[in-house]
Amino acid sequence: MSLKSRIETVLFVIAKSVTIKEIAEILHEEEPDIEEAMLELIMDYSSRDGALEINDENGYILQVKEEYANIVEKLCPVELSGAILKTLTIIALKEPIRQSALKEMRGASTYEHVTELVKQGFIKRTKDKNGRSFNLHTTPKFQEYFQLQGDTDLLRKMIDTDEHLKED
């Protein structure tokens, strides 16, 4: 069993960014050996016409290339944390809602939540009239993902946003 194959196994199973040091500890190997084999593995992946790549931006992670992301999105549903889901719920129930008003309700972490929700395609941001804040709206992806067909009235009746959606 080659060191490259063992590293590839670690990257596949761990499914998150990992450092050379962490891989060396897992495989009980020396860091320089891991680093050398990792460079060879990166070159192997970059030289073939496949859907996978090793990203080395913040550690090493085996991932699907960007051009194949749409396939992954169809097959693997997005997972959102409870706090982000609460933020999304407020946006859906009160849309359009100003980002500044949402921050007052949910706290400073709202900015990270909004960034993640925009990245995932569940909401969009548009500048409000005075240009000082953003208005937040859900997208068709949100409605499709949660099978709401554009109607959030039932949700408004079911949830008391002031009591249940405060920051965690």
Image (tube, helix red, strand yellow):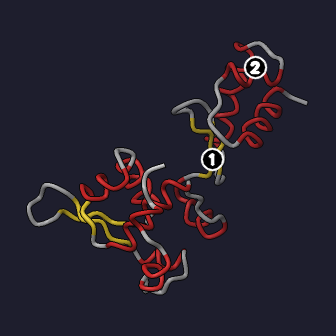
Residue 97 x, y percent position in the rendering = 27, 67
* View extreme (right): residue: 1
Residue at the left extreme of this rendering: 130
Q: Earlier in the sequence, mark 2 or mark 1?
A: 2
Relative vertical location of residue 7 with respect to residue 31 in this rendering, above or below: below
Q: Quadrant of residue 105?
A: bottom left
Q: How many residues crowd mark 2 within 10 Å: few (<14), some (14–19), many (20+)? A: some
Q: Out of 123 and 46, give the one closest to the viewer.
A: 123
Is 153 placed above or below 19 here?
Answer: below
Q: Which numbered tag is attached to residue 21? A: none
In the foreground, 89 or 118: 89
Circle 1 is placed at which residue position?
63
Which residue sits at x=73%, y=20%? Answer: 34
Q: Would residue 104 be found to the left or right of residue 20 on screen?
A: left
Residue at the spot of label 2: 24
Q: Residue at x 53, y 58 (%)?
A: 67
Q: Residues within 10 Å of mark 1 (few under 14, many from 20)?
A: some
Rendering coords of residue 149 (x, y %): 48, 87
Q: Are marks 2 and 1 in contact (CB under 8 Å)?
A: no
Q: Amino acid at mark 2?
A: Ala
The amino acid on which the numbered mark 1 sits, given as a three-letter code, is: Gln
Distance of label 2 from label 1 (alpha carbons): 20 Å
x%, y% of residue 27? 82, 23
Q: Quadrant of residue 71?
A: bottom right
SS type, badge 1:
strand
